[in-house]
Image: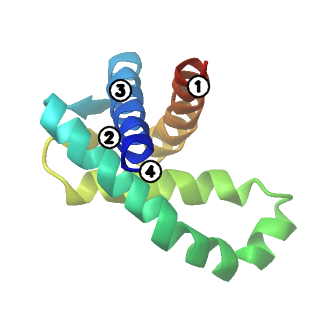
Amino acid sequence: MIVRFLLAWLVNTLALIAVAYLMPSITVSSFGAALIAALVLGLVNAIVRPVLVLLTLPVTILTLGLFIFVLNGLLFWMVASWLEGFNVAGFWSGVLGAILFSLVSWLLSALVQR
């Protein structure tokens, strides 16, 4: 169980570094900063995001689920505002970065599972 957690943390860290490499509006200053940012992103997605999804359910239904992208972008941008060494230039960079982070993380997880 601990090994699975550490592997997921490493995959998310590498995904965050890849997003920073692909998007000039997102920067990560070091591997250590990426480790901390990946951990905080994981905690926020596990604890805060479900509460916000529940609270914004009417808006999500009204927008046919597209508000989830806004919510993910806001959380990605918020985590970057809390941490030194992880910067997101703005809201739209956060939305695109969150989408790209999810895709890269999913791809890397699929490669590791094999």
Q: Residue under label 3, please give it.
A: 14
Q: Please, what secondary structure does the residue beneath circle 4 have?
A: loop
User: Local crowd at mark 2 within 10 Å, few (<14), some, or many (≥20)?
Assistant: some
Judge whether 11 appears above or below 47 on screen.
above
Return the disc, 2 or 3, that comes first in the chain's sequence: 3
Along the line of sight, which residue is nearer the eye, 46 or 61? 46
Numbered mark located on residue 66 in the image: none
Where residue 3 sits, quadrant-wise, is: top left
The residue identified by callout 2 is 89
> Residue 37 location, x and y as percent?
27, 47
Residue at 32% across / 40% down in the picture?
Answer: 89
Q: If you read the primary sequence from the N terminus, does the residue marked by circle 2 or circle 4 appear first?
A: 4
Mark before the other along the chain sequence, 4 or 1: 4
The residue identified by callout 4 is 1
Q: CA distance from mark 4 to mark 1?
A: 15 Å
Q: Nearer the viewer, mark 2 or mark 4?
A: 4
Q: Nearer the viewer, mark 2 or mark 3?
A: 3
Gap in angstroms between the C-alphas marked 3 and 4: 20 Å
Location of mark 1 (residue):
113
Secondary structure category for the residue under label 2: loop
Q: Is 42 displayed left or right of 64 in the figure?
A: left
Instruction: Point out the frontmost of discs 1 and 3.
Output: 1
Please tell me whether mark 3 or mark 4 is closer to you in this view.
Answer: 4
Asked which secondary structure carries label 1, the reply is helix
- How many C-alpha atoms fall within 10 Å of the one at disc 4: few (<14), some, or many (≥20)? few
- Is residue 59 placed above or below 41 in the rendered structure? below
